[in-house]
Image (cartoon, rainbow, N blue to C red):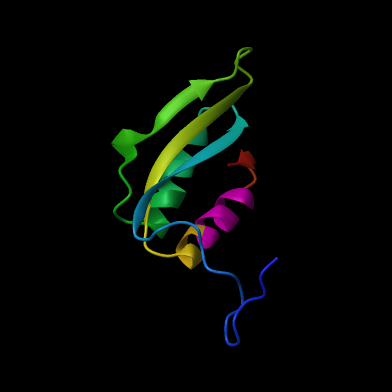
Amino acid sequence: MDKPMPGQDKPPSLIEFPCLFPIKVMGKNVPEFSQVICDLLLSMNPGFDVAGVEMRPSSKGNYISLTCSVQVNSQDELDDIYRALSGHELVSVVL
């Protein structure tokens, strides 16, 4: 594995920024899930387009997945979004 250059904390990202990045968020199928996730994303990224969110229930209907495309400008911004989503009590998995 390549070592970061002096002064770099981590290797460069393979993603070209800015970009529209799809994030899949899965959790229990409760009535407030999609609204809470969209509100969280809007608070972190005011330009987030809620109308573009795709929702899919699991085969038994116990879980729901949201695919949210978020405009991000840097790896740090994307990492912050992943951390916030992963740490939320309603969220089971973030991909």
Magenta-colored span? 79-87
Q: Quadrant of residue 16?
A: bottom left
Q: Where's residue 81, x and y in %?
A: 50, 56
Closest to the observer: 41 or 67? 67
Residue 1 appears in the rendering = yes
Is 11 displayed left or right of 77 in the figure? right
Residue 32 appears in the rendering = no
In the displayed image of the protein, which residue is found farthest to the top? 60
Q: Residue at x 65, y 45 (%)?
A: 89
Up-down relation of residue 55 to residue 24 (above or below):
above
Q: Residue at x 42, y 65 (%)?
A: 74
Q: Where's residue 80, x and y in %?
A: 53, 62
Number of labelled discs?
0
Is 24 displayed left or right of 6 in the figure? left
Closest to the observer: 18 or 93? 18
Up-down relation of residue 38 to residue 9 (above or below):
above
- Residue 85 in the magenta stretch? The answer is yes
In the displayed image of the protein, which residue is found farthest to the bottom? 7
Is 85 displayed left or right of 50 in the figure? right
Q: From the image, give the main secondary structure of the stretch colored magenta.
A: helix
Q: Quadrant of the C terminus?
A: top right
Q: Quadrant of the N terminus?
A: bottom right
Closest to the observer: 58 or 17? 17
